[in-house]
Image: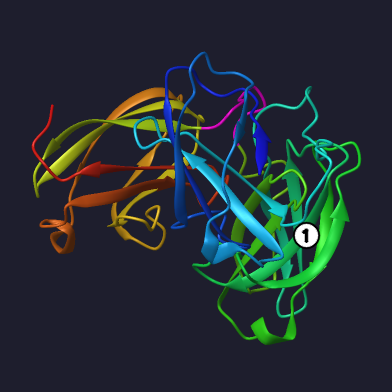
Amino acid sequence: MTIKTLNFPKDDSFVVTMGVMGTRGIGGIKVATTDSGDGGSFKKTYTIPASLHGASQIAIRMESPTSGYYAYNWFYNNTTDGKPSPTKSPAYSGIPTFNILAVKQDETVTIRTNNFPPNDTFKVQMNWMGTQGMGGTVVETIDSKSGGVFTMTFDIPKKYQGENRIAIRLESPSTGYYAYNWFYNNTTTDKPGTPSMPSPGYVGYPTFSITGVKQGDFMTVKINNLPPNDTFTVRMNWMGTCGINGEVVATFDSGTGGKVVKKFNIPSFLKNADRIAIRLESAESGYYAYNWFYNNDAH
């Protein structure tokens, strides 16, 4: 299959993996390592691994183990004429997020979006807490129309009625954009005018690099483009998990945002691990970033 990249960083190396549909390529079969060269836009062709021959849909992922940048998509495993798939609007930048506006216990949840891309279709899923809504029950499919900010109400599926907390996810099968959040399944209304979203001037998304490691003890990171006035939970977990559902090692306030240097202790169950995944995520805005590091002394 052949891809065309957009806005790739220069002088970076990306591991290309393919996996079954729904995995986003995480933990998939490595098919190549690609040097981004001058970055920007370029075309590459990759061989579909034998174990995925016959699959109807295949996920593909490009991820840099050094910078943490990644991109993923999926394709139908059919011969095509090379016409490009629908792409994200060139005028759109940043990532979509949403906050919980109101809940009617066991019946409905109302959300307010922020910075949604225009003219896109999103599947709305709900699932158990901790899943980020992935693989959940599809409750509705919505059209983002002009994008930006809008309010919508969704029914809570019967299987999650009675649950204390529920994860909700909006994901576009065409562009790959997604956002997720969670809510307490109690009747409540958010206070008007106080949405849990980054300030309007923020664009892009946070990333971070590993700046130092003390084996089995602690590690330090440099965070870039941190959104202001947000709260982040820091988790560590086994390599390959992207830090999802890992042990919470810290919580911090982003303050004015931007660039920040932080130090985090390595949890006891990972002290002897060869490689460790680390994740920063906000339950308020939905922003997150993850990376990994070798558990060896490094500065």
User: For residue 201: magenta?
Assistant: yes
Q: Which residues are magenta?
A: 198-205
Closer-to-camera residue (252/218): 218
**In the displayed structure, does residue 226 sit left or right of residue 176?**
left
At label 1, counting other C-alpha atoms closer than 10 Å, the crowd grade (few under 14, some 14-19, many 20 or more) is some
Left or right: 37 in relation to 185: left
In this rendering, the answer to whether 52 lies above or below 38 is: below
Most foreground residue, 274 or 212: 274
Question: Label 1 belongs to which residue?
Answer: 123
Give the quadrant of the N terminus: top right
Whether 298 is among the magenta residues is no
Residue depicted at 51% across the width and 21% down the height: 9
In the depicted view, which residue is nearer to us: 33 or 113? 33
Identity of the residue furthest to the top in this view: 38
Q: Residue placed at 40% from the left, 52% from the top?
A: 242
What residue is at 62 percent from the left and 72 percent from the top?
Answer: 127
Q: Give percent across and percent down for residue 253.
A: 40, 38
Q: Name the residue at 51% across, 40% down.
A: 62
Q: How far across and down, in percent of the image, does residue 57 sit?
A: 69, 61
Does residue 293 sit above or below 99 in this rendering?
above
Q: Determine whether, in the image, residue 33 is placed left or right of residue 116.
A: left
Q: Would residue 192 be seen by someone viewing this image from the given angle?
A: yes
Please tell me whether the stretch drawn in magenta is mainly helix, strand or loop.
loop
